[in-house]
Image (cartoon, helix red, strand yellow):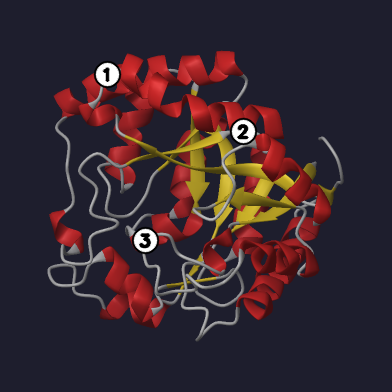
Amino acid sequence: MKAKLGIAPIAWSNDDLPQLGGETPLATCLAESRLAGFQGVETGGKFPRTSDVLKPLLREFQLDLVSGWYSGTLLDNSVEDEIKKSLPQMQLFRECGAVCLVYGETAGTIQNRQDVPLAQRRRLTDEQISEYGEKLSRFAEFCTDYGVPLAFHHHMGTAIEDEHDIDRLMAATTKDVGLLFDSGHLVFAGVDPLQILKKHGARINHVHTKDVRKEVLSSLDWNKDSFLNAVLKGVYTVPGDGMIDFDELTRTLANLGYQGWFVVEAEQDPAKAPPLEYARIGHGTLQKALHAAGYTLVEGKM
């Protein structure tokens, strides 16, 4: 079984909360990512938008482009317009060798609204899920044909957040719609990650590994606290610093036959959680878990 370790720049800088590391240069993020031992990175707001600028930058720090977030709006948009909107990012990702497009549904999202509590996120009826699934499947078919497969990111504060949402979405979509498995968002949403692996393991084409601080999670008031407030309180951290058993998760993923990137994420305040220090904790925890599960970390293409 083969795997590679990547990291998201959100450990250094948060696009939705610019007060968290907004002043940190991209070069620092990339240099410390490599210093911590990672082989690749996902994009963030500070990244160049053209391959002629981004590719030399990644080469300088000996990093691959893994993937990156795409703010999808198919819930309220046509497939044709969504394709047009996505083309610049799709072109960048294809030219830079990204393995997938991380699609998050941001139509009506409250993930970036500090004034809206968790309980007030958008919810979809079965009929709406069915209509959405048809559009998402068509968009995912375009992504597959373009050479940058879609990995759907269930995410706190969005219309696809919990187990019921994920189950219905998977049933309403074709296999072109891959599922991004995010341990931290699942646990935050009250979902047992192992159940998602059991039910939808065959659809998983990308993995995000973030941990959750149990004491912070249990202290949240979903009728008062927003997602961003939860982030500021420190609900997320890197693997090895929270409540999630990554040995069990990686072992289960190995048994499912998953091979690919494992990306460390942790939306934290860099002033409280020094990024390089925590990146090393996450890398060490995952490296140990992957080896125990029978994975081999490889360089180059898998």
Q: Position of residue 29 (x, y in %)?
A: 65, 65
Which quarter of the figure is the C terminus placed in? top right
Which callout, 3 or 1, points at the residue further toward the start of the chain?
3
Query: As drawn, is 175 to the left or to the right of 232?
Result: right
Q: Position of residue 258 (x, y in %)?
A: 67, 38
Find the distance from the CA under tag 1 to the CA under tag 2: 22 Å
Q: Which residue is mark 2?
A: 93
Find the distance from the CA under tag 3 to the CA under tag 1: 26 Å
At mark 1, the secondary structure is loop
Query: As drawn, is 96 to the left or to the right of 233?
Result: right
| Amino acid carrying mark 2 in the image | Phe
Query: As drawn, is 273 to the left or to the right of 107?
Result: right
Q: Position of residue 126 (x, y in %)?
A: 17, 28
Identified at 29% across, 27% down, the residue is 74
Question: In this picture, is 185 found above or below 272?
Answer: above
| Amino acid carrying mark 3 in the image | Asp
Closer to the camera, 253 or 58? 58
Q: Which residue is mark 1?
A: 78
Badge 3: few (under 14), some or many (20 or more) residues near its Cα, within 10 Å?
some
Q: Which residue is mark 3?
A: 16
Identified at 80% across, 41% down, the residue is 1
Q: Position of residue 92 (x, y in %)?
A: 60, 32
| Amino acid carrying mark 1 in the image | Ser
